[in-house]
């Protein structure tokens, strides 16, 4: 099992840096966001540029395709 142990979650600071446009209860709680997306075979919004994030295609395949195009 994957475990993240943190002394303190800086939710408000994380929210200011988060580019996710999808409304959810995990916004600002990066550890929960990562676990959620990992369980679905996805990556969180912060792995994508803003224009790509807005498509809500968080698949690993999409991530690879986009960054292969940049090469």
Image (cartoon, rainbow, N blue to C red):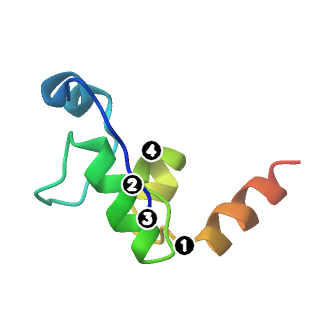
Depth check: give the residue in front, 71 or 61: 61
Front disc: 2 or 3: 3
Q: State the separation of the CA atoms marked 2 and 3.
A: 14 Å
Where is residue 44? Give x, y as percent. Answer: 42, 55
Q: Residue at x 44, y 58 (%)?
A: 2
Q: Secondary structure beneath disc 1? A: loop
Q: Residue at x 23, y 26 (%)?
A: 16
Where is residue 14? Give x, y as percent. Answer: 26, 29
Disc number placed over residue 59 in the picture, else none: 1
Q: Residue at x 49, y 60 (%)?
A: 43
Say which label, 3 or 1, has the lower sequence index.
Answer: 3
Query: Which corner quadrant holds the N terminus?
Result: bottom left
Disc number placed over residue 1 in the picture, else none: 3
Disc number placed over residue 34 in the picture, else none: 2
- The reply to whether dot 2 and dot 3 touch (C-beta < 8 Å) is no
Where is residue 37? Give x, y as percent. Answer: 40, 66
Whether 27 is drawn above or below 14: the answer is below
């Amino acid at each position: 099992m994957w475990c993240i142990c943190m002394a303190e979650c800086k939710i408000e600071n994380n929210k200011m840096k988060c580019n996710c446009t999808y409304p959810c209860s995990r916004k600002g709680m990066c550890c929960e966001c990562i676990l959620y997306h990992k369980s679905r075979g996805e990556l969180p919004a912060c792995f994508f540029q803003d224009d790509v994030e807005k498509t809500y295609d968080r698949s690993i395949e999409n991530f690879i395709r986009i960054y292969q195009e940049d090469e």
